[in-house]
Image (spheres, rainbow, N blue to C red):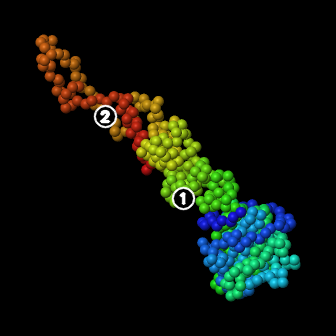
Amino acid sequence: MPIRLVRGAALGLGRALLAIALVPSLGLAQVFPSDDAYVAVQCSGGDSWDPASDGPGANSERDIVGEDGAPAVLLHDDGDFLFLRLRIAADPSSGGAFSPFGWGFEIDTDGSLDTYELLAILDGIAGPEEVVLARNDVQASLDDPSDPAETVLGTYVAASHAQTSPAGTVLGGGADFFLTIAVPILDLEDAGVDAARASVVWAGTSSNARSLGTDMACHDGDLGDAFLSAIASDGLLLDPDGDLDGDGLTNEAEAEAGTDPADTDSDDDGLPDPDEVGLDTDGDGIDDALEPDDDGDGIPTADEIADDKSDGDDLDRDGDPSHGDTDSDGDGFSDAEEGRDDDDGDGVPDYLDPADLPDAGPDAAPPPDAAPETDASVDAAPIPDAGPAPQPDAGAESPGDAAPAAPTGGGLAGGGGCRTIPDAPALGFVLYVLAGLRRRRARAA
């Protein structure tokens, strides 16, 4: 199973730790892989590194070395074991026995980079020598790699779970060596490591078997003490090609996108991650898969999906569904202005209702005598009594004869003093609409 580097990934891991200590492993048979199977652990985007003889105690077999092209820390996962490897300045074993020191790896499982939760370490002090998996229950000293791990979760015989081999470099002044330990994957997962999420490790040497601190990788000891948060590795996935939540996105793809590999809808907006990864509807630089309001109109995407769609999800036929459209009903007023109120009480939110004025639905009209008083009301003047309408002269001999002149006073036809009387129901409706528009503009302001 390949290990994959993940740049810019969320570095949180499994949140649950095993409630009881693990039974010591019986030691599954394993074969240490060839050198070309290992993946370089990176720090800040480059190969893990460490200067030779940097700081007190960092010498000989306790001196980690590394540079670009010859990384200080490497990993390999074969599906059964996680192989963790250090490049050191001298052979840590002689006559078949390891020197009385420690070489190990601290692992983060809670996403907080000022603490570590697990320690996998080769204990050259114990008799017999062994690889130990331990848990740091209490970080008594924050940001400190030398804080000891208190609870032993598993032990593995060093003869079958650790080895040294020539590294083929001379960064320490002489021949460098690899020291590699193997830890069962199942034991790591039971202890809280999540193969579907990016892992962070710290590597170092020690004068004891319960912490690190003599020489830490990716840190120049000549510059002072090492702090966990400053020297954490980049994220690595133990199972990049898996699909923990079964949504069609690999664990690696989810790590790169920042989505949750255990959740098919990371932002809980009702749309699955595969439909949103790589999209940025509102252009704010945040992927839709991570944003609960895709179009940035102030109405959550989940609400826009859940609201009434009896007329379809693209009311204005502009090709954009309502959750990706800032004017869903195409009435010239933005969704942010209209909101989810229901002014006309028809059960459709205003942002989805192009006719959303109170009582102005398709079957409702204001009563003829109910026009509101507004500044635009017409002050109807009394109509002058025009008397009987003029009749044609009975003596007219042909249609071409001139008709009597129309009145020029205040009558209904002609004359500067006349006015046309609007139809009362139509006028009431117009004024009612104007009043509704005023209320809407006032609310938007």
The residue shown at (68%, 57%) is 242
Camera-side residue of 19 and 43: 43
State the quadrant of the N terminus: bottom right
- Can residue 219 be seen from the camera position used here? no
Q: Position of residue 368 (x, y in %)?
A: 40, 28
Label at residue 258 = none
Separation of marks 1 and 2 at Cα, in angstroms: 57 Å
In this rendering, would 360 be left or right of 242? Answer: left
Residue at horizontal 74%, vertical 86%?
60
Q: Residue 379 carries which label?
A: 2
Nearest the camera: 254 or 291?
Answer: 254
The amino acid pointed to by label 2 is: Asp
**Residue lying at 66% horizontally and 54% vertically, measured from the top left:** 263
Q: Quadrant of residue 380?
A: top left
User: For the residue marked with disc 1, what is the amino acid?
Assistant: Ile
302 w.r.t. 205: above or below: above
Whole-percent x, y for residue 63 in the image: 71, 83
- The numbered mark, 1 or 2, whose residue comes first in the sequence reads 1
SS for tag 1?
A: loop
Q: From the top left corner, tell me how far across and down residue 72 is, in percent.
A: 68, 77
State the image coordinates of residue 289 (x, y, percent, origin top left): 58, 55
| Residue 382 visible to an observer of this rendering | yes
> In the structure shown, which secondary structural element does the residue marked by tag 2 occupy?
loop
Against 189, is 215 above or below?
below
- Residue at 70 percent of width and 87 percent of height: 174
Q: Is residue 118 left or right of residue 351?
A: right
Q: Is residue 410 left or right of residue 219?
A: left
The front one of 341 and 369 is 341
Residue pointed to by mark 1: 286
**Looking at the image, residue 28 lies above or below residue 141:** above
